[in-house]
Image (tube, rainbow, N blue to C red):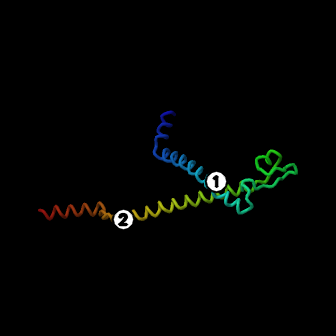
Amino acid sequence: MLKEFQEFISRGNVMDLAVGVIIGAAFGKIVDSLVNDIIMPIVGAIFGGLDFNNYFFGLSSNVHSAALADAKKEGAVFAYGSFITVVLNFLILAFIIFLMVKAVNNLRKRLEREKPAAAAAPPADVQLLTEIRDLLAKK
């Protein structure tokens, strides 16, 4: 079982997947920072100057705090600002991934167009008949 695991983990696909997951996690943190530290403060300023993550309304009569963290301690809250932030994170990340995939596809198409057209090799039977003809011509 240990040998099978070593064979599995040493395959190139597994290592590529691991690298992709690690880079994806790091990229997700960059997008989170972009949304939370740059975009959402601007959106919050447009909608009244508050931190957009603190947009919520209490589902209980006990909720009176203005900060989401404190309000959650007081009772159930409907935190729609946090949800909007996460949706915005997703949309930005999806758009960037779309642009990356589009760039890779364009690069592949360009490389395919630049690749010289390889001469199609004749089928084996035609090649064999050509060799026989050439041998008979030499005699």
**Looking at the rendering, in which quadrant would you find the C terminus?**
bottom left
Q: Nearer the viewer, residue 130 or 111?
A: 111
The image position of residue 57, as x and y in percent, is 81, 55
Residue name at image x 73 percent, y 59 percent: 49
Residue ID for mark 2:
114
Looking at the picture, which amino acid does disc 2 mark?
A: Glu
Of 103 and 134, the residue lying toward us:
103
At mark 1, the secondary structure is: helix
Task: Specify the amino acid type for callout 1.
Answer: Asp
Furthest residue toward left: 139
In the figure, residue 79 lies in which quadrant? bottom right
* Circle 2 residues within 10 Å: few <14, some 14–19, many ≥20: few
Going from N to C along the chain, the mark reached first, 1 or 2, is: 1
Q: Is residue 5 above or below residue 84?
A: above
**Mark 1 lies on residue:** 37
Q: Is residue 120 left or right of residue 88?
A: left
Q: Residues within 10 Å of mark 1 (few under 14, many from 20)?
A: few
* Of the pair 90 and 105, the residue shown nearer to us: 90
Residue 109 is situated, as x and y percent measured from the top left of the image, at: 43, 64
Could you tell me which residue is drawn at 68 percent across and 61 percent down? 43
Where, by quadrant of the figure, is residue 115 drawn? bottom left
Q: Is residue 45 left or right of residue 97?
A: right
Horizontal side, residue 2 vs residue 138: left or right:
right
Q: Residue furthest right?
A: 61
Q: Is residue 129 above or below residue 2?
A: below
